[in-house]
Image: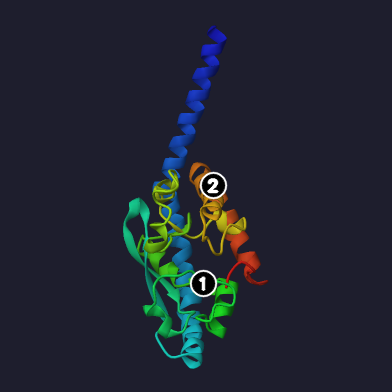
C-alpha cells in the first residue's frame, strides 16, 4: 500500500514538473526563441528577399504585393495575417473558399510561392508583433473556423496557444485543403499533440522539417 502511494506521489510530482516546464517554455523561452529567430530572418533575409518577391508579383499580375486576411488567434482573438499575394487581385472580393488543385484564381507565380511555402514569409512580422509564433497550430480564416468550432468539441483547444507559421500537423502531411470534418480531425490530432508536448527541441525539429521540403516543393499546396 505504501509502495503504491509512493509511486502515485512520484508520478504526480513528475507530471507537475512537466507541466511547469511546459508552461515556462510557452510563456518565456518560446517568445525569446521567436523574437531572436524572427529578428535575424527579418534583418538578413526578408529585408532584401521580400522586395524581390514583391517585384516579381507586381510584374506578373496587377494588385498589392501583400495579402491581408483576418484569422483566428490565441483565445479566439482575430488578427490580420500577412501573406505574399498568390491570387489574382480580382479574387479578393469573392466569398471565402480554400484554394484547390489547379485553382484558376492562383497566379503562375503564386503557385510556385505556395509550393515552396514562400507565401508565408511576411508572417515573421506577425511573430514580431506577438500575434503568431514560429511553431504552433496554423491559424485558419475566421470563416473557415466557423465550420468546425461547434462540430468538433476539442477544436477550440487548438487556440489555447499562439498560432504558428508552421506546425506539427503541416510537417506530418496534414496540410492543404481541409474541406470536411475527417480531414480537420486528422489535423486537430497533431495540433493537440503538439500543445501537450511542446518544447524548444520539438520547435527546432519542426522548423527543420519545414525548411527541408521547401527546396523540393510541397505537393499538398496549390
Left/right placement of residue 81 relative to residue 169 reads left
Say few, some or many: other residues with alpha carbon within 10 Å of mark 1 (under 14 / 14 to 19 / 20 or more): some
Using the image, determine if residue 139 lies above or below residue 46. Answer: above
Q: Where is residue 218 drawn, in percent x and y? A: 63, 69
**Residue 33 vs residue 149, the one in the foreground:** 149
Q: Quadrant of residue 83?
A: bottom left
Q: Which residue is mark 2?
A: 189
Residue at image mark 1:
99
For the residues labelled 1 and 2, the Cα–Cα distance comes to: 23 Å
Q: Which of 194/78 is in front? A: 78
Quadrant of the image occupied by residue 68: bottom left
Res 7 → quadrant: top right
Q: Which of label 1 and label 2 is nearer to you? A: 1
Identify which residue, 45 or 118, lies in the foreground: 118
Q: Left or right? Give the position of 15 relative to 174.
A: left
Point out the tag, 1 or 2, that comes first from the N-terminus: 1
Q: Position of residue 125 (x, y in %)?
A: 40, 69
Give the position of the N terminus as an image quadrant: top right
Q: Is residue 192 above or below residue 86?
A: above
SS for dot 2? helix
Q: Which residue lies at the image location 42% right of the left edge and 57% below the top edge?
A: 147
The residue closer to the viewer here, 193 or 212, is 193
Q: Residue at x 41, y 64 (%)?
A: 141
Q: Is the residue 188 above or below the residue 129 in the image?
A: above
Can residue 65 be seen here? no
Query: Please, is residue 194 above or below residue 54 in the view?
Result: above
Q: Disc number at residue 19?
A: none
* Outermost right residue: 216
Residue sticking out furthest to the top: 1
Amino acid at each position: 500500500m505504501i509502495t503504491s502511494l509512493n509511486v502515485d506521489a512520484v508520478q504526480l510530482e513528475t507530471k507537475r514538473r512537466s507541466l511547469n516546464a511546459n508552461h515556462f517554455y510557452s510563456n518565456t523561452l518560446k517568445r525569446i526563441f521567436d523574437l531572436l529567430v524572427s529578428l535575424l530572418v527579418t534583418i538578413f533575409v526578408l529585408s532584401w528577399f521580400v522586395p524581390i518577391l514583391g517585384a516579381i508579383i507586381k510584374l506578373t499580375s496587377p494588385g498589392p504585393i501583400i495579402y491581408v486576411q483576418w484569422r483566428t488567434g490565441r483565445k479566439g482573438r482575430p488578427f490580420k495575417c500577412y501573406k505574399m499575394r498568390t491570387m489574382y487581385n480580382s479574387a479578393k472580393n469573392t466569398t471565402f473558399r480554400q484554394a484547390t488543385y489547379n485553382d484558376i484564381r492562383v497566379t503562375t507565380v503564386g503557385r510556385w510561392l505556395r509550393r515552396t511555402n514562400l507565401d508565408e514569409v511576411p508572417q515573421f512580422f506577425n511573430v514580431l508583433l506577438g500575434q503568431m509564433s514560429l511553431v504552433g497550430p496554423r491559424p485558419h480564416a475566421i470563416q473557415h473556423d466557423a465550420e468546425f468550432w461547434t462540430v468538433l468539441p476539442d477544436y477550440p483547444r487548438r487556440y489555447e496557444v499562439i498560432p504558428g507559421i508552421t506546425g506539427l500537423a503541416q510537417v506530418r502531411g496534414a496540410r492543404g485543403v481541409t474541406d470536411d470534418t475527417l480531414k480537420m480531425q486528422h489535423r486537430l490530432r497533431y495540433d493537440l499533440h503538439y500543445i501537450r508536448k511542446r518544447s524548444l527541441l520539438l520547435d527546432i525539429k519542426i522548423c527543420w522539417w519545414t525548411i527541408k521540403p521547401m527546396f523540393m516543393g510541397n505537393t499538398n499546396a496549390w
